Image: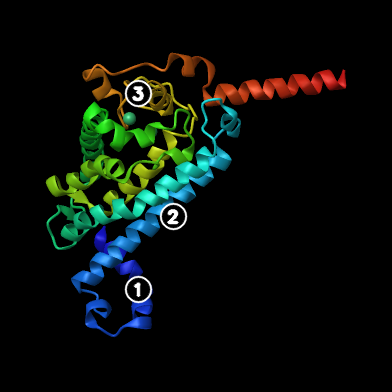
Amino acid sequence: MADFLLNYTNPVFDSAFDLFTDSPVWTVHDSTPRILVQLWVCLTVLGAFQYLLGATLNFYFLFDRETLKHPKMLPNQVAREIYLSLESLPWTATVTVPWFYFELVGYSKLYDTIETWWEVPLQIVTFFLFTDCLVYWIHRGFHHPSVYGWLHKPHHLWKVCTPYSALAFHWLDGYGQSIPYHLYVYMFPMYKPLYICAFIFVQFWTISIHDGVYISNDEILLSCAHHTIHHLEFNYNYGQYTTLWDRIGGSYKKPVEQYEKEMFFDKIKKRKELEASGEKSKSD
Ligand SMILES: [Zn+2]
Ligand SMILES: [Zn+2]
């Protein structure tokens, strides 16, 4: 992944560094200071771009903006979420760069060529099971009173979430919960393009569990309805993708009310029925 980022951005950084230096420290592609700076800029800028793009598309096309009138919505909440997310990203990028750098110099188990057809599906399953387990325990650990107040509470300011809540964390909180994704490729072999796809997917998934769109009432898959309960009641549904570890850890709570009243397609159906009855009464 690090080589992918560097190769695609080298022309831009060549032009930028040429403007103010001819030192090989900055003009040679293999120079370590240049690699570290380039990775940091890439992680910060691409992270911000993907966050703003994903959350904004969601905000305008999926999120029910009537939610902004909810009494538990804070004043200027969306602006505060965006500010906290963008303020945290450079710090998260700083502590993430070493993972990418050591991956680049060959310490990870990422590889470029598939040899058997079953590698990819197997890695999809193991990657999500591994990260689902570790994210659960890390997230649950962040609720411990010794760290909660300064570390995880900033993310729990948002009682009612918006798509922009997804990355609105203290930087160490966001980084802590990302460690399993980096750790996986240092412990297990993974096909590089799959890792890139998984990384992008994780960002969109994180937005989707904060957007208030309840499209699934599955008992196994952890959906936005479950994470809504986490933001409202704190001590339930710490998971990321499945309810497995919440069930094992005794923190599972079924989102009964959300399933009964606010499922996305039911809401659309009801709205259409109301519109249709309104039009009918007008024509009568
Ligand atoms: Zn939490
Ligand atoms: Zn959240």
Instruction: Report whether the residue tagged 3 is closer than 8 Å to ligand 1.
Output: yes
Callout 3–callout 2 Cβ contact below 8 Å: no
Location of residue 134 (image quadrant):
top left
Quadrant of the rendering where the C terminus is positioned: top right
**Above or below, 214 relative to 41:** above
Answer with left or right where residue 38 lies relative to residue 281: left
Residue furthest to the bottom? 22
Judge whether residue 33 can be spotted in this image.
yes
Q: CA distance from mark 3 to mark 2?
A: 30 Å
Q: CA distance from mark 2 to mark 1?
A: 18 Å
Residue at the image point whose x is 33% and y is 57% from the top: 43
Residue type at mark 3 is: Phe
**Above or below, 81 relative to 49:** above
Residue at the image point whose x is 22% and y is 30% from the top: 146
Residue at the image point whose x is 14% and y is 49% from the top: 186
| Residue density around tag 1, few if under 14, some if 14–19, many if 20 or more, within 10 Å | some
Quadrant of the rendering where the N terminus is positioned: bottom left
Residue type at mark 1 is: Phe
Residue type at mark 2 is: Phe
Q: Position of residue 38 (x, y in %)?
A: 30, 67
Residue picked out by circle 1: 13
**Above or below, 212 relative to 86:** above
Q: Secondary structure at mark 1?
A: helix
Q: Secondary structure at mark 3?
A: loop
Label located before the other in sequence (2 or 1): 1
Residue picked out by circle 2: 49
Instruction: Report whether the residue tagged 2 is closer than 8 Å to ligand 2.
Output: no
Answer with left or right where residue 284 lies relative to residue 111: right
